[in-house]
Every structure is written in C-alpha cells, then in structure tokens.
Amino acid sequence: MYRAYVACGLSKNARPAHECGHRSKLGAFFRSSVATTYTVCVKFPTNRRLCARGQQAEAGVTYVNRLTSSIVGWHRVTWFAGGRRIAWTFWRR
C-alpha cells in the first residue's frame, strides 16, 4: 500500500541512500496505492525533530521531500499515514 525510502538526489531514479557521498542531496520518497495524507519527520543527532505535516499524495504518484542537514551523525526519517507509522530509516551525514 505504501512505499517510503531515502535516496541520493531528488529524482525517481536516485541511488539508495547508503551509496550517497558526503555532499549528496538526499530525498525522502513516498508513494501510496491510494490517495492519502502523510507526514515525514527527521530526527537529528541533536534529538531535534522537524516534520512536514499534511502532505497530500495522489494514488500511484511518487513524492519527494528534500532532506538537508549540516549536523554530523545519524538521522532518523519516519513516515506516517492513516494515523500510524508506516516506515522509518536512518541516514548518516
């Protein structure tokens, strides 16, 4: 029903995040088989959390939120839809 992941760059053909170089642009990708509203959140190594709430997604369309951070360490990206957590992953800067 949902597909969510982090990749190098902002295009649908971006490489997986574990292949990113230090200065690569990162994207948080989201796709749903049904129209939905989703939220994507980043928890930084400093424990600060930033969320993009109320993102509208049409069925079958891939959406991307750009991820940026100058903080060194592990970042956690979490997606929510339908009132529940649907996916999470980590990336390192």
Image (spheres, rainbow, N blue to C red):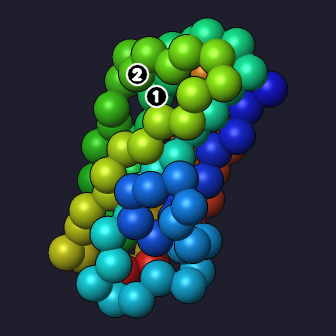
Residue 51 seen from this side: yes
Along the viewing direction, whichever of 51 and 47 lies nearer the viewer: 51
The earlier-in-sequence mark between 1 and 2 is 1
* Viewer-side residue, 39 vs 25: 25
| Kind of residue at badge 2 | Gln
Q: What residue type is labelled 1?
A: Thr
Q: What element carries label 1?
A: strand
Where is residue 39 shown, x and y percent of the image?
A: 46, 28
Q: Specify whether 14 is left or right of 41.
A: right
Nearest to viewer (mark 1 / mark 2) = 2
- For image coordinates 72% across by 32% down, the residue present is 2
Please report contact status of discs 1 and 2: CB closer than 8 Å, yes or no.
yes
Taking depth in this image into account, of 60 and 41 the one nearest to the observer is 60
Residue 73 marker: none
Q: Which residue is drawn at 55% across and 15% down?
A: 58
Q: Quadrant of residue 3?
A: top right
Query: Is the residue 40 above or below the residue 72 in the image?
Result: above
Q: In this view, does 5 lie above or below 90?
A: above
Q: Which residue, given by chain and number where applicable, does mark 2 sit on?
A: 55
Placement of 7 over or under 18, stated as above or below: above
Q: Is residue 39 above or below residue 69?
A: above
| Relative horizontal placement of residue 83, taking residue 73 as reference (left or right) | right
Q: Where is residue 11 in the image (x, y as percent from the top left)?
A: 44, 56
